[in-house]
Image (cartoon, helix red, strand yellow):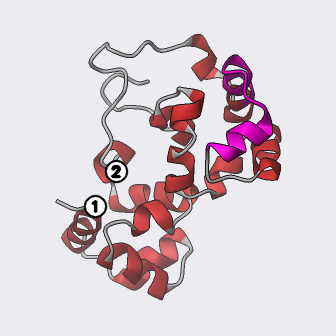
């Protein structure tokens, strides 16, 4: 089932109106309609912090809300000690490990170099970013998406 249909179905199951959900996550009603009407809207048009609020409002784990598998549950991906760092420090460490300048990381993602600088200063910078942009950091930094999202798997706790 498409993510927008999961959201709509869960909202209805809980007996919530579109207005109630929009208010709970701090967006305009018209923006919330876009979330339920367009399968890619959650990736392109909503900030991470709002998605986390949506997840909480609907009583869904982020792994239930997003079509995302845990990178660690099957044991094929090692959980590195640096994943415990605040995200701003982690991004710096991983960028340097890959020998990328801030500009080079920007060139490989949807972020500008000044945004890379800001995310390396502010541990909560990614909370105001769109999922699609965050997902673009996964490959160049060689890090699982769940780590950049700051969410833990309900099964393995990583």
Q: Disc 1 on helix, strand or loop?
A: helix
Label 1 packing within 10 angstroms: few (<14), some (14-19), many (20+)? many
Depicted 123 relative to depicted 67: above or below = above
Q: Mark 2 and 1 residues: CB-CB less than 8 Å, in contact?
A: yes
Q: Nearer the viewer, residue 72 or 135?
A: 135
Residue at the spot 40% in from the left edge and 56% down from the top edge:
55
Report x, y in % for residue 38.
Answer: 33, 74
Which residues are drawn in magenta? 92-108
Left-right relation of 140 to 99:
left
Occupied quadrant, residue 58: bottom left
Q: Can residue 50 be seen in this view?
A: yes
| Residue 96 lies in the magenta-colored region | yes
Which sits earlier in the primary sequence, circle 2 or circle 1? 1
- Which residue was labeled with disc 1? 3
On the rendered image, what quadrant is the N terminus found in? bottom left
Q: Disc 2 on helix, strand or loop?
A: loop
Occupied quadrant, residue 56: bottom left
**What kind of secondary structure does the magenta stretch mostly adopt?**
helix
Residue at the spot 53% in from the left edge and 62% down from the top edge:
50
| Residue 27 lies in the magenta-colored region | no
Depicted 19 relative to depicted 143: above or below = below
| Residue 45: mark | none
Report x, y in % for residue 51.
Answer: 47, 59
Residue at the spot 53% in from the left edge and 26% down from the top edge:
142
On the rendered image, what quadrant is the C terminus found in? top left
| Residue 66: mark | 2
Report x, y in % for residue 81.
Answer: 59, 12
Report x, y in % for residue 105.
Answer: 69, 38
Label 2 packing within 10 angstroms: few (<14), some (14-19), many (20+)? some
Q: Can residue 122 be seen in this view?
A: no
């Amino acid at each position: 089932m498409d993510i927008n249909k999961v959201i709509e179905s869960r909202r209805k199951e809980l007996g919530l109106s579109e207005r109630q959900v929009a208010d709970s996550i701090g967006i305009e009603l018209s923006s919330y309609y876009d979330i339920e009407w367009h399968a890619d809207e959650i990736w392109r048009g909503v900030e991470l912090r709002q998605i986390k609020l949506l997840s909480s409002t609907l009583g869904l784990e982020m792994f239930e809300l997003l079509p995302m598998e845990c990178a660690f549950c099957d044991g094929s991906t090692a959980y590195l000690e640096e994943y415990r760092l605040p995200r701003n420090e982690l991004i710096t460490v991983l960028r340097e490990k890959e020998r990328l300048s801030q500009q080079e990381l920007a060139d490989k993602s949807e972020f500008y170099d000044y945004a890379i600088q800001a995310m390396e200063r502010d541990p909560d910078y990614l909370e105001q970013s769109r999922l699609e942009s965050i997902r673009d950091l996964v490959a160049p930094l060689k890090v699982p998406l769940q780590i950049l999202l700051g969410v833990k798997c309900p099964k393995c706790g990583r």
